[in-house]
Image: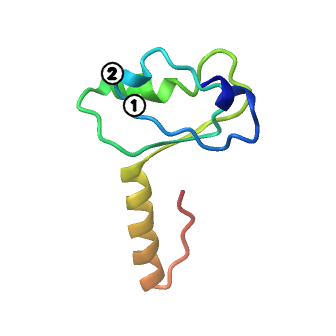
Amino acid sequence: VATFNGDQSCGVFLLHAGTAAAGLTLTAARHVFLLEPFLSAAEEAQAMNRAHRIGQKHRAELLHALQIILCLVLSRVFEHFDLSVHCC
């Protein structure tokens, strides 16, 4: 965690968003991708807030895997019908 937050050459930090990440603060994060579904809305909110804690120096963008998939599907549909769309 210290390396990710302090070393700019460390570009990716992968972890399970459940109990292994309890109390974690990722102040160097610029993008957060939630790739697993949460059964609890409170746990999901806590996972999203890990990148928005005190000390954050950057604007952090949060995306769920479902948002990414929906964006890709909609882009293909609009492409098929020759419509312009800006997604994600």
**Residue positioned 65% across, 25% down in the render:** 27
**Residue positioned 65% across, 39% down in the render:** 30
Give the numbered dot on residue 85: none
Query: What residue is pinned by disc 1?
Result: 17
**Left or right, 20 with reference to 60:** left
**Residue positioned 44% across, 56% down in the render:** 68
The mark that comes first in sequence, 2 or 1, is: 1
- Quadrant the C terminus occupies: bottom right
Quadrant position of residue 86: bottom right
Query: What residue is pinned by disc 2?
Result: 42
Residue 20 in the image: above or below residue 67? above
**Left or right, 41 with reference to 63:** left
Give the percent coordinates (x, y) of residue 4.
Answer: 65, 31
**Residue positioned 41% across, 52% down in the render:** 67
Mark 2: few/some/many CA within 10 Å (<14, 14-19, 20+) = few
Mark 1: few/some/many CA within 10 Å (<14, 14-19, 20+) = many
Give the percent coordinates (x, y) of residue 1.
Answer: 59, 25
- Residue type highlighted by circle 2: Ala
Gap in angstroms between the C-alphas marked 2 and 1: 12 Å
Give the percent coordinates (x, y) of residue 84.
Answer: 55, 75
Instruction: Say which of 50 and 74 sits in front.
Output: 50
**Left or right, 9 with reference to 13:** right
Instruction: Say which of 65 and 12 sits in front.
Output: 12
Regarding mark 2 in the picture, which secondary structure is present there? helix
The label nearer to you, 2 versus 1, is 1
Residue 1 in the image: above or below residue 35? above
Residue 20 in the image: above or below residue 85? above
Instruction: Say which of 38 and 12 sits in front.
Output: 12
- Residue type highlighted by circle 1: Ala
Quadrant position of residue 40: top left
Regarding mark 1 in the picture, which secondary structure is present there? loop
